[in-house]
Amino acid sequence: MVRSGIALISLALLVVGCAGHPLVPKEQALAIKTRGRTLAPHARAIHEAIRQSGSLGALAFLDAGDGHLVVLPGNTPAEAWARYSASPSESSPGRVLVPSVVSFVYSSDVPKVPETVTHVFLQQQQTLGTSLIALDTEQRHLSDSIAATRQETQQSIAAARQDMQKALNSLAEDLDAARKFMLQTADLGRLNQKALTSLAEDLDAARAFMLQTAQLGWLNHELNVQNANGIRKAARASEQLTSDSARLADTMRQLSESLADQLKELAGRLDSIQSKLSDVK
């Protein structure tokens, strides 16, 4: 009670000082005098509310509508008003009517005189706090966006590096494949050269074989001529004819067999030449 009385005396002195200041409007000075007188009977209730809340003080005023006592605890006037504004009953029909001037009364344990605060100042502080909260939220969103953008940029750079590394690896593989293809092409060229050389040799052998066959044919013709002469002579001598006919028949048989073997060999060589030509193509 002693501390409450001291606080109220200090409040009254502050009210008198403020009311007498030439910068305070007459209407506000009158409201300060009236507020001091009307709050004095409620000192016990005000300090009890502060004590129960555990705060450093509270905004205290009488409702401008029905005159009942309103105590809004808080560590500062702005905090007390912010708590009140953020309470769920802000938009309810029973909302109090705040006068133009209110008092922030400190706890009896705090050696400070009550402060006079205007309703407009509290609203300005609330608007400023809301703006600061909005700016802080926007700053956090901006920081999150910057962090996300940075992460996306880092991921894009990492993906680009991976794509570049894959492209370099693919290029190296293509170069290796091209080198192997060139080596294989060179080897194939050497094989083709060998095949052409072998084909030329086979053609020379075939040419020689054909010349031999032609010679055999000429010899066969000569033999046929000789046989004809022998037959004419055989007509003159039957015994000689019989002997010559047998010898001629044997010779013709041998020549026919030799010619057939040579033609068969020629056909085999021609087939071999044809196969090699197909392989070269």
Image (spheres, rainbow, N blue to C red):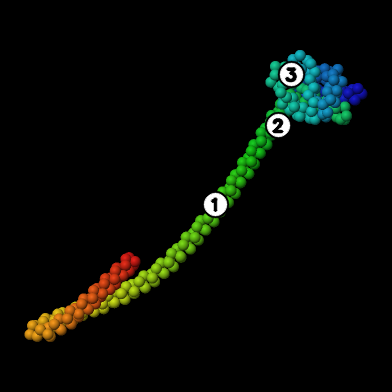
Closer to viewer: mark 1 or mark 3 = 1
Real-space Cα separation, disc 1 to disc 3, in angstroms: 64 Å
Taking the spot 80% from the left edge, 22% from the top edge, the residue there is 71
Taking the spot 51% from the left edge, 56% from the top edge, the residue there is 167
Badge number at residue 129: 2
Seen in the picture, residue 146 relative to 194 is either above or below; the reply is: above
| Helix, strand or loop status at disc 1 | helix
In terms of sequence position, does the residue under pointer 1 or pointer 2 come before the other? Answer: 2
Badge number at residue 96: 3
Q: Amino acid at mark 3?
A: Val
Real-space Cα separation, disc 2 to disc 3, in angstroms: 22 Å
- Relative image position of residue 244 (x, y in whole percent): 15, 83
| Quarter of the picture holding the C terminus | bottom left
Seen in the picture, residue 270 relative to 47 is either above or below; the reply is: below
Real-space Cα separation, disc 1 to disc 2, in angstroms: 46 Å
- Asked whether residue 230 appears in the rendered view, the answer is no
Taking the spot 92% from the left edge, 23% from the top edge, the residue there is 2
- Relative image position of residue 37 (x, y in whole percent): 84, 18
- Asked whether residue 108 appears in the rendered view, the answer is yes
Q: Residues within 10 Å of mark 3 (few under 14, many from 20)?
A: some
* The image quarter in which residue 34 lies: top right
**Residue at the extreme top of the image, as rendered:** 66
User: Residue 54 or 19: which is nearer the viewer?
Assistant: 54
In terms of sequence position, does the residue under pointer 2 or pointer 3 come before the other? Answer: 3
Q: Amino acid at mark 1?
A: Ala
Reading the image, the residue beneath label 1 is: 160
| Helix, strand or loop status at disc 2 | helix
